Image (cartoon, rainbow, N blue to C red):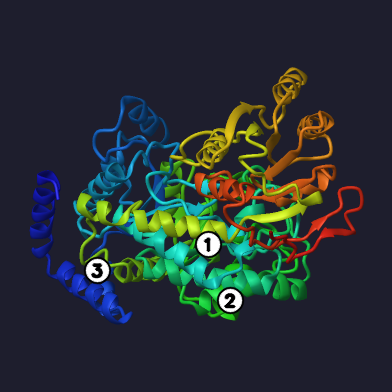
Amino acid sequence: MSDRLRTSRRTLLAATAGSAAAVAVGSASARAAEDGTVDRTALRALIDRMSLEEKVGQLFVMRVYGHSATEPDQADVDKNLEEAGVRNAAELIAKYRVGGIIYFGWAHNTRDPHQIADLSNGIQRAARQLPSRTPALIATDQEHGIVARVGLPATLVPGAMALGAGGSRADTRRAALIAGRELAAMGIRQNYAPVADVNVNPANPVIGVRSFGSDPQAVARLVAAQVEGYQEGGVAATSKHFPGHGDTKDDSHYSLPTIHHTREQWNTLDAPPFEAAIAAGIDSIMTAHIVVPALDPAEDPATLSAPILTGILREQLGYDGVVVTDSLGMQGVRTKYGDDRVPVLALKAGVDQLLNPPKPEVAWNAVLQAVRDGELSEERLDASILRILELKARRGLFRNPYVTHDGVDRNVGTRTHRATAELIADRTTTLLVNEGGLLPLSPREQRDVLVVGADPASPSGTTGPPTAVLAGALTELGFTATRLSTGTAPSAAKIDEAVAAAEGKDAVVVGTYNVTASSAQRTLVQRLIATGVPVVAVAVRNPYDVAQLPEVRGYLAAYSWTDTELRAAARVIAGRTSPAGRLPVPVQRADDPGTVLYPVGHGLSY
């Protein structure tokens, strides 16, 4: 432990010891860690000591810019002043008494594991300055796969659909356990994962590979496994997005989607993964900014719907844990109501945590005023705060909210974790097409390989663009691999360049990303095939790409473009491992969507 961390910890532990209520809650937290129970009497006593302002603050999970709780870069100070009227995380906590903070890569919260640990400790020190000295609950979206806020050198395990292709409950649980231990070591104690949506719509623009698949029972089994893994690892799991975002063609970040499932369809398709999460003891469930008329005829977003959150989630499914909104900055929840009404309506619907309001001061004051005006009772706030404090106690935050650099080094990105992630990934890569036994390629017979294709923005901390990672992995496996990034919408000039670069090569490996009927990626692949050089395609996101490229003789689904999954795909291409993944979603024909081209369970092996 560094001298600064050791001194700060001694100071704060001494301050905590001066509060009998805090000591009582710390004891309750210790019991929670040992036997799963929580002393509600001690927690209620803590709530009784809170001012109304503190109670309102406990309901919010806000973002803040910067790598440090007290000394962020000037650009981050400027953003914080612009958005929240504060300079840093410590001031945010002091002003709004917030109960939680969410980390984002784009907010410069997650540079590296030691920095994250220091930021977490700084936030906890600031939280201990509040009158109640209640620790903060620090959260992030670490789904893995295409959504990873904390990147290398932390371990990047395969994402949900890749794990769905692997089909192993043990692997899925193990991946979450690794992730949970690493997040907890950095001071992050709530993870907004796993995704419990059943992706039955190939055109879904926001879920896709973030889902485990299209079979509700298979998804339920793997959701439960991840809940167990994350929470054993020390973080609160969060299944999302209730009541189910898997059958939308619109993105709730930008619009308000409607799901037209009947109540019977919802019971069969959407409910099972959430029921499984609840049965597994999940700590929190996230709402969706979607309309489901069969569940609420008023057609309010589920986040603001009492019939959905209280009537179905609380009463029908019997869930009494924390309910957290999806980001309140998303357009889906802002379509019908203003930013001052959304947080109040969410609380009235049954929400406990209000995540990432776009205008923190407006949202915080709106809730405060709603209590003062009698629209919300203080007892209503107390019920949510008790759930939040119980979660914090279960995660040991009252006992000791701080982390150390030594703990980071012992847990984050260890050789054992990375090796386990690689082994899991080897069991997920799916071979969809292998005409004429094109694969595996041989570094002796097909040594000179060109790697081209899409380079989507990489999750935080990956070693480079996907084409570079794939080319590097193939080179390590004995090939001479050169790389040309052609992008997700290659121009005619870029396609010509790729075709010229393919001349004289033994094979071309092309990464595809969300290929559509009008995509220039189709033209690129067709032109490459016309050269006569063998072409192997790797879908680096949705496996549905294969339907748009029927001419390709060798096609793999990697389900993501992280190092872990691309390196696993390279091992399959080189024949170092046999492909073991099986499609967790069906792929329909592009020219006849009513006909299944590759069914659930399809996958070839060597």
Q: Is residue 303 above or below residue 333?
A: below
Q: Position of residue 317 (x, y in %)?
A: 58, 79
Query: Residue 461 location, x and y as percent?
Result: 43, 39
Q: Amino acid at mark 3?
A: Leu
Q: Residues within 10 Å of mark 2 (few under 14, many from 20)?
A: some
The residue that mark 1 highlights is 194
Residue at image coords 21%, 67% = 399
Query: Is label 3 or label 2 in front?
Result: 2
User: x, y (%) of residue 375?
Assistant: 48, 61
Q: Nearer the viewer, residue 603 or 442?
A: 442
Q: Is residue 379 left or right of residue 4?
A: right
For residue 192, say whether it is visible: no
Q: Name the one closer to the observer, 277 or 263.
A: 277
Q: Position of residue 432 (x, y in %)?
A: 74, 54
Q: Earlier in the sequence, mark 3 or mark 1?
A: 3
Q: Are marks 3 and 2 in contact (CB under 8 Å)?
A: no
**Image point (64%, 47%), residue name:** 573
Q: Can residue 295 be seen here?
A: yes
Q: In the image, is residue 380 above or below residue 77?
A: below
Front tag of 3 and 1: 1
Q: Residues within 10 Å of mark 3 (few under 14, many from 20)?
A: some
Give the distance between the C-alpha atoms of the residues marked 2 and 1, in whole angstroms. 13 Å
Badge 1 crowding class, 10 Å Cα cut-off, few under 14, some 14 to 19, many 20 or more, is many
Q: Which residue is mark 3?
A: 46
Residue toward you, 548 or 319: 548
In terms of secondary structure, where does tag 3 sit? helix
Distance, label 3 to label 2, CA atoms, is 32 Å
Image quadrant where one finds the C terminus: bottom right
At numbered mark 1, what does the secondary structure look like: helix, strand or loop?
loop
Q: Earlier in the sequence, mark 3 or mark 2?
A: 3
